[in-house]
Each structure stands twice: as structure tokens, then as C-alpha cells.
Amino acid sequence: MPALRLSVVVTRRLPEAVETRMKELFDVELNHDDHKMSRDELVDAMKRADVLVPCVTDRIDATMVAQAGEKLKLIANYGAGVDHIDVSSSRQRGVLVSNTPGVVTEDTADMTIALMLAVTRRIPEGLAHMQAGDWEGWAPTSFLGHRIGGKRLGILGMGRIGQAVARRARAFGMQIHYHNRKKVHPDIEAELEATYWDSLDQMVSRMDVISVNCPHTPSTFHLLNARRLKMLKPEAVIVNTSRGEVIDENALTRALRAREIAGAGLDVFEHGHEINPRLRELPNVVLLPHMGSATVEGRIEMGEKVLVNIKTFADGHRPPDLVVPSMT
């Protein structure tokens, strides 16, 4: 008699190749219209599934975990970040949590450099000018930006993505500086010619570009607060492709409006898709809809990791990308 297949609920549409493979392996319930599930819908899904496959748009807190049925045994997150899931409460309920680390590294680093160039070279302004049909020809002083070669880049968070950003930035001739919970291995520092700053205050006050590449944790919430933002040089630029909560968005908006900071490139926001309307109006800001990891290759690879985690769990083994509470 064949073994019973795990019941899996997927909260958002995934690439077709991933969904097809899931249907072959498990009893899958897909979100065909790709709507963002409500809190009640998520709780209902957790009651009827062996495995829930959520993503960053699904906030799963302790109260919701407490309402989950006895059937739920694994939350196989589609994404690397798990700050939207109460991992500790899940483990206390006997529910494992897995994620997809490493998949988005190169794509997010690419987007970080793209935003850096877009802000410093005023690419969106030039694009809007051309699309409006306003261009009357080249002029020596029109759309003047700044080169990034020779500039100091301060990386906040020197994990996989931070190091990938540093490698790309070095190719542009930037000087690499970083702040991290601890220094990276000397071999990595030597490869990147990176300078470690124990004091974040001292680092931000000396950089031309700040790249936020650290996760959102209680200790990194508003790490770039109003006080630290005032330390930046007036010609400095901030790029954030990590988590919006790391920057005090209202304080950043005020600093940008007052031209206390030259510009910002943001792919993530403090309150999800609810962005400060004053931020949208600023010409010295480039806003993207969380596109950092949005490549076909990356999304499929992410799905493949989810499949491996679920299949390994189904076979009675520990998922290879198991998240433990101390990691969050």
C-alpha cells in the first residue's frame, strides 16, 4: 500500500515548473488567483495542511501558530528571510520552519549596484525626460550625476549578500568599508580589501554610499535612525535591498526632503507596500517594488529548495534548510 502523500498549502503563485513538480510529489492546494491570504485564511490553511508554504507577504505570529491544527508539522518558507514567522512559537508547537538561504545572493547584489547607479547617475530622471518627449539634445550641464569609482562604500551587514555587493563594487573602483556584528574572516577582508568599522556611527559619517544588507531583527530595527541619518554627509546616498525596518523611513524622508542626504535607492520599505507618500514625490529617490530577487532563475531555484526541504521531511529526515530560533 503506497504511503500517504503530504498535504501542502501554497499561499501564493509560484513559477509553473515549481507548482507542477509539487503536484507530482504532494497533495497540493495552490492559490490560483494569487491573492494575498488574510489572517483567517492563513489560520485555516494551517489547520488543514501538513505543510504550509508561505512567503514574505504572509505574517505568521504566535497567536496564529497557537490556532494551527495538530496536523501542521512544517512551515517551508519560500524565501530566505523568516522575520515574518514566529519561529520560536512554531518550534514550541512542534512545527519545524525551513527557508531558502543563498538563492537570492547574486540577484540582490546586482540590484544593489543597479540602484546605486540609478541614484548617482539620475537614470530615472533621464528616462522620464525622454518618455515625456522633452529632450532637446545634449548639453554640457544637463543631468549631471556623480561617478562611483573612488567613492567609499559602507556596507551594513557583511553576510553573503554584503560580500557579493562588495565584489561588484570593487570592480567599479569603490573603496569597501563595512560594519557587522563581528569581523569577517581575514581572507575575505583581504580579497575584498575591506575595512572593518566597529563603530557604525563613525562609519556612516565618512561614507559616500551606504548599502543596507543586514536582516531585520530586534537589534537592527531602525539601526539607521534619525540621529545616525544626520551623521551622513550631504552628498551621501543610501541604498536598501534588505529590509525596510532597518531604516526609520519617516526620518529618511525628512532628510531627503531637506537635502541633508543626496539621494536614496529603496527596494524595501518599513511598512511593506504602504510607502510614505512624501517619499514618492522626491526626485532624488528611486523606488522599486521589492524586485531584488525577481529573476526567473532565482525564483525557480528558490522553489527547488522548498521542494527539497519538504521531500526530505516527508522521507523522515531533517530539512536541510531548517531554521532554529537562535538564527532569527
Image (spheres, rainbow, N blue to C red):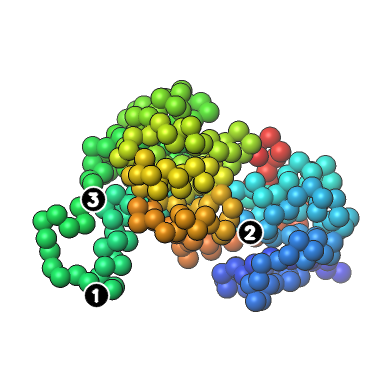
- CA distance separating discs 1 and 2: 38 Å
The answer, for residue 314, to whether it is visible in the render is yes
Quadrant assignment for the C terminus: top right
Q: Which mark is residue 145?
A: 3
User: Residue under circle 2?
Assistant: 57
| Mark found first going from the N terminus, 2 or 3 | 2
Give coordinates of residue 158: x percent, y percent: 46, 35
Nearer to the camera, 256 or 45: 256
Residue drawn at 70 percent across, 40 percent down: 324
Give coordinates of residue 72: x percent, y percent: 82, 56
**Amino acid type, mark 1:** Gly
Judge left or right: residue 85 versus residue 164: right
Judge left or right: residue 52 versus residue 268: right
**Amino acid type, mark 3:** Gly
**Residue, far right:** 70
Judge left or right: residue 152 versus residue 165: left
Residue drawn at 34 percent across, 29 percent down: 206
User: Residue under circle 1?
Assistant: 133
Nearer to the camera, 218 or 205: 205
Question: Could you tell me which secondary element the residue under label 3 belongs to?
Answer: loop
Contact (CB < 8 A) between labels 1 and 2? Answer: no
- CA distance separating discs 2 and 3: 35 Å
Depicted 185 relative to depicted 77: above or below? above
Quadrant assignment for the N terminus: bottom right
